[in-house]
Amino acid sequence: MERIIILSGLSGSGKSTAAKVLEDLGFFCVDNLPPELLFSFIDLCGKSLTQIKKAVAVIDIRIPEKDTLYDFEKVLEKIKKSAEKVDLLFLECSDETIVKRYKETRRIHPLGSEKTLTEGISEEKRILADIRELSDKRIDTSTLSVHDLKAIIAQIAGTTDKQTPLITLLSFGYKYGVPEDADLVFDVRFLKNPHFTESLRDLDGTRGEVVDFVMSDKPSREFLEKLCSFLRFLIPKYSEEGKSYLTLGIGCTGGKHRSVVMADALGESLSEYSAIIRHRDINKL
């Protein structure tokens, strides 16, 4: 077996979309597979008449809790010895996003029959906590479009240009914590702050008035120029090392003004990399 991807994550985080992308990329997919049958599944793939070389197994909360982590770590180690490359991917997103998605689709959470939706989400996080910790890559889909998620999955699967890593520009507010998935973090709290201008305080960094306010200041323009130059030097170096994705965190105090402006400006200036832009905290108070 050349490649195995084990896909897990929270209900509503996009596992079905990810699985379909991988299936379209030539992976043989099986859904709702109990962990203790993982190795048997991999073994059967290798013995099949069609000689399956790439496979995906989806593990989620539909499996009873007593089986979810049944010797999972041991099974995972065994699988890693049976294939050339094995990845455990975990998809997650914010509680608010999950609630919104369930309301839009009118679906019932797998644990929602005897619990409220928020209680079901909390319980699912608890049950899947160990699998999350074992994962090789965690993907937060809270602000990702379907197109963005497909691009990330394709990159991880190794079907896009290996010379260029998939770049995510993530604006955030330090008051809400530094993103744990950021590879590099840039602090822009030294830039001129729109928060102290009453007419701009309630606007966000996507508004033209705020953009003009921030970028009219010389240090903002100099910082953008120097950062672009630095990244154009750095990104090819990461590519040479085989890095397939790169997340750049850009933070200000609240994640609403300066970091948003700079992330958008950086994405436009580095258009040759077609970066994904996410504003994690733009709607927080």
Image: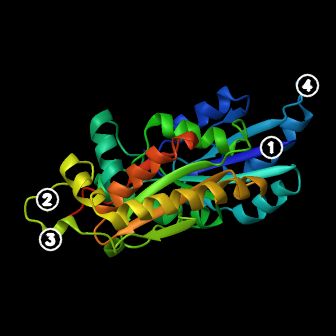
**Residue 141, visible in the rendered structure:** no
| Observer-nearest of 140 and 42 | 140
In the rendered structure, which amino acid carries the disc numbered 4?
Answer: Leu
Picture residue at 65% right of the left edge, 26% below the top: 24
Element marked by disc 4? loop
Q: CA distance from mark 4 to mark 2?
A: 65 Å
Real-space CA distance between mark 2 and mark 3, rounded to the nearest whole angstrom: 8 Å
| Color style of the picture | rainbow
Q: Quadrant of the N terminus?
A: top right
- Circle 2 is placed at which residue position? 200
SS type, badge 3:
helix
**Residue at which label 3 appears:** 196
Q: Amino acid at mark 2?
A: Leu
Q: Which residue is mark 4?
A: 49
Percent position of residue 159, x then y: 72, 35
Tell me which amino acid carries mark 1: Arg
